[in-house]
Amino acid sequence: MQDNVHKQIIWDSIVCLIVDDDKFSRTFAKTALYQIGIKNAKEAGNTEEAIELLNSFKFDIILLDQQMPTQKGLEFVNSLKSGQIEGGKNVPIIMITVDTMEKTVLDAKQLGIQEYLVKPISPLALKKRICTALGLKQERI
């Protein structure tokens, strides 16, 4: 029983930022997070909204789409990692996208994106990637 309480505390304490221009994709990601026990997620429809949220909240992880109209996900990550955007330099990022081009995947890794998921995602796959990105042992969760 004690272990289950500990597991719940871990997931309850995680705060996630979902950045995707597609409302359905954001809702789907939020539902997947909820199913694995992460109830605290903020949504941004573009990188400008994401920057505002990063200035207002402390996030443990970012779920980021690559294909967005005003600024691509990788461009946003470049700005984050270089310190041009406050509050996100050391936040683990999981890229969730339909983009499977090898160059995009390699660029993502080079920029320090921890995990890469291809849409559509499953809650179980997302949970595994979050565990890896946050350095949590899968069996503990």
Image (spheres, helix red, strand yellow):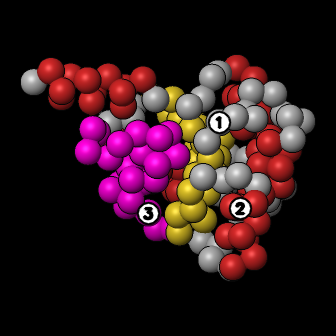
Q: Residues within 10 Å of mark 2 (few under 14, many from 20)?
A: many
Measured Cα–Cα span from mark 2 to mark 3: 18 Å
Left-right relation of 32 to 100 = left
| Residue with the most extreme right position | 84
Q: Amino acid at mark 3?
A: Ile
Asked whether residue 104 is drawn in magenta, I would say: no
Spatial CA distance of label 3 from label 1 is 21 Å
Would residue 16 be visible to someone looking at this image? Answer: yes
Q: Quadrant for the N terminus, please.
A: top left
Identify the residue at the far left of this view. 1
138 in magenta: yes
Residue at figure coordinates x 15%, y 21% from the top left: 2
In front: label 3 or label 1 = 1
At x 77%, y 49%, the residue is 77
Which residue is denoted by mark 2 in the rendering?
A: 108
The crowd level at tag 3 (other Cα within 10 Å; few <14, some 14-19, many 20+) is: some
Q: Which residue is mark 3?
A: 121
First along the sequence among labels 1 and 2:
1
User: For this rendering, which residue is in front, 99 or 28?
Assistant: 99
Looking at the picture, how far across and down is residue 26, in whole percent? 54, 50
SS state under label 3: loop
Given contact means CB atoms under 8 Å apart, are the residues at marks 1 and 2 in contact? Answer: no
The numbered mark at residue 43 is none
